[in-house]
Amino acid sequence: MNMENIEFVLPSEIEKRSFEIITKELEALGKIIPDEEAPVTKRVIHTSADFEYADTLTYSENAIKIARDMIKNGAHIVTDTNMAMAGINKNRLSIYGGEVHCFMADESVAKEAKERGVTRATVSMERAAELNVPIIFAVGNAPTALISLYEMMEKGIYRPEFVIGVPVGFVNVVAAKELFLHSDVPYIINRGRKGGSNIAAAIVNALVYGL
């Protein structure tokens, strides 16, 4: 076994070293990320080891400030998977009065979705809309969650205050993201097929850690 290329880093320094490498490689690639957005984009790259996010992560005007102001004022996070909910630092969020919700595994949600012939993500977003709190939606898996939110907005039933739209996959994924890219709802969207629950959680954590 050849150990020559192994870099010995203290456990407490691994994350810091990772971000140093990310910053250096972005510079080498000629990628310039606005200062406000850099912590979020870099954390997504840190989570995925995928530098393409430097090109595809898209932010509406003042998105970072809007999201962080919402969190500081006690906004809750609604995810479309338990994986994303598990990955969000709930202790840090709770400092500001925020909580994380995911309705996907609720038996009543599954029952209603089956009866109506819709996805659980659709019903979950409808349940979230009934919460009487400001919400940041963090969607990393189900494009139907984004579609449901958009349809409620179009019908005048509910308007999301902020959307993190990073579902991964092939069916309706790109089109669902495009809905919010062309809306007036503040957003952080990853264009294209890439994303995932881990990416949604990473974005939320980056927003919280920056406070």
Image (cartoon, rainbow, N blue to C red):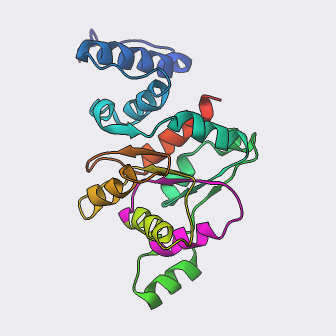
User: Which of the pair 110/31 is nearer the observer?
Assistant: 31
Q: Residue 176, image x and y in percent?
A: 33, 60
For the point 61% across and 31% down, the residue is 209
Segment colored magenta:
122-143
Furthest-top residue in this view: 4
For the point 47% across and 82% down, the residue is 113
169 falls in the magenta region: no
Q: Determine if residue 105 is in view.
A: no
For the point 25% across and 64% down, the residue is 171
Q: Is residue 161 above or below residue 125?
A: above
User: Which of the pair 171/178 is nearer the observer?
Assistant: 178
Q: Residue 208, image x and y in percent?
A: 61, 36
Q: Is residue 81 above or below residue 199?
A: below
The quarter in which the C terminus is drawn is: top right
Q: Determine if residue 50 is in view.
A: yes
Q: Residue 91, image x and y in percent?
A: 70, 42
Q: Is residue 158 above or below residue 179?
A: below
For the point 32% across and 35% down, the residue is 53
